[in-house]
Amino acid sequence: MGLFDDDFYSTKLSRRHVRMSSVNNPEWKERRGKKGWSTLQISMFSSMLSAVVAVLLFSLITGLPASSSRNGSGSSDLSASGNPFERISLAADKVAPSVVSILNQSSASESESEQGEALGSGVVFKKDKGKAYIITNSHVISGTDSLQVVTNDGESRKANIVGQDSINDIAVLEVDDNGISSVINMGDSTKLRAGETVIAIGNPLGLGGTLTSGIVSYTNRLIPISLNQDGVYDWEQEVIQTDAAINEGNSGGALVDLNGDLIGINTMKISDTGVEGLGFAIPVNDVMKTVDDLMLHGKVVRPYLGVYTLDLNNPYAEIDDDQRKELNLPNHVQEGLIVLEAHGPAKKAGLRLNDVITQLDKQPVDSTKELRRYLYGHKKIGDSMEVTLYRNGNLETVTVTLTDKPSDSEIESGLNK
């Protein structure tokens, strides 16, 4: 009985009330016969649901996967980890054995080696018939007397040059593959996105195996460069821009994604007061086009015109009034290329000193950079090319048959004849 003798407050129903309800409501028995959820069942279901929700929320917040997985080979699948910091560690472990340090020993660079200018990096990309092949920058091995490669485990061995290309700044080296077990995986630089996390691995200032990370700041930046190091920009290099730290000695090293795949070869940085986080790498798709030529021919096969020129409107080497008067150019000609030397195909076609080239195949050309871009992008060895020029004030046209570029010694021999 309740505190008050009243069924309204009681937790139980009297038999009389039940009987009366049954009489007055025929559906009562049917409703009593249907089983509902008990309080215990509802509590257990709520607890289980709460536990599942809590686990899912924890996974989302921490970025950890609900379950781990491995690929068919038994090695860790780097993309399975949702934690970007863990993925950086896994990618670095995967890539590090295939990145080497390069020491350029030159009799002319003993003092430079103390400043780290004779140090560089490289990436093992192939093993074949007892040899391992390494990609690096051409400027890393420039002027060398002897090259030493130091592997990730500290072993040093002599390297030979398979080929190099100063225009694309890529070189391939060859070493004995004894003890070299890791070859880097190739990525696809065309699939890069701005903001993607990348890792640079190399030998900055002689500190081999150094790892830095950052993001892709720009996927296909065009950087003007001076091939002759004379301050005149005569070529453009397409590069990946990154804020991953790249320092002297990093050149030729690997820029990889979080899967440990090679996406670029570190090549340069901008170092100036107030400048930070501007590093550049040559996209791997461009690198491998050059590497294929170097492996096959020992050089990059390009069409060769055979002129050494000076831009008519070069701001770093402006011609004065007397020099322009000597060229005898019409007043409306303000852009073109002054021929300073002609050899090979150009000499054979009749080009000579102080000719001013204004068109190639009727396409305007106003700089050495434009000449190279047209020559390398639109012509092949054996092609004919129409060259429009001014000679002593007269407009003339000559046809040049393009050839393969001879060696430097062959060029010098031809000039001395």
Image (cartoon, grey):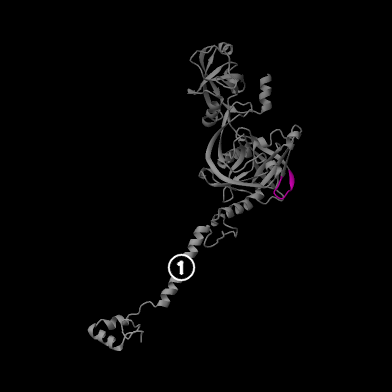
In the picture, the quarter occupied by the N terminus is bottom left
Identify the residue at horizontal 52%, vertical 38% (top origin). Answer: 220
* Residue 262 visible in image: no
User: For the stretch drawn in magenta, what is the main secondary structure?
Assistant: loop
Name the residue tied to disc 1. Answer: 50
Is residue 334 toward the left or the right of residue 347 in the image? left
Query: In the structure shown, which secondary structural element does the residue marked by tag 1 occupy?
Result: helix
Residue nearest the observer in this picture, 248 or 192: 248
Q: Position of residue 416 (x, y in %)?
A: 69, 19
Q: Quadrant of residue 2?
A: bottom left
Q: Position of residue 231 (x, y in %)?
A: 62, 26
Identify the amino acid type marked 1. Answer: Ser
What's drawn in magenta, residue-wise?
150-157
Is residue 35 toward the left or the right of residue 82 in the image? left
Residue nearest the observer in this picture, 246 or 271: 271
Q: Position of residue 158 (x, y in %)?
A: 74, 42
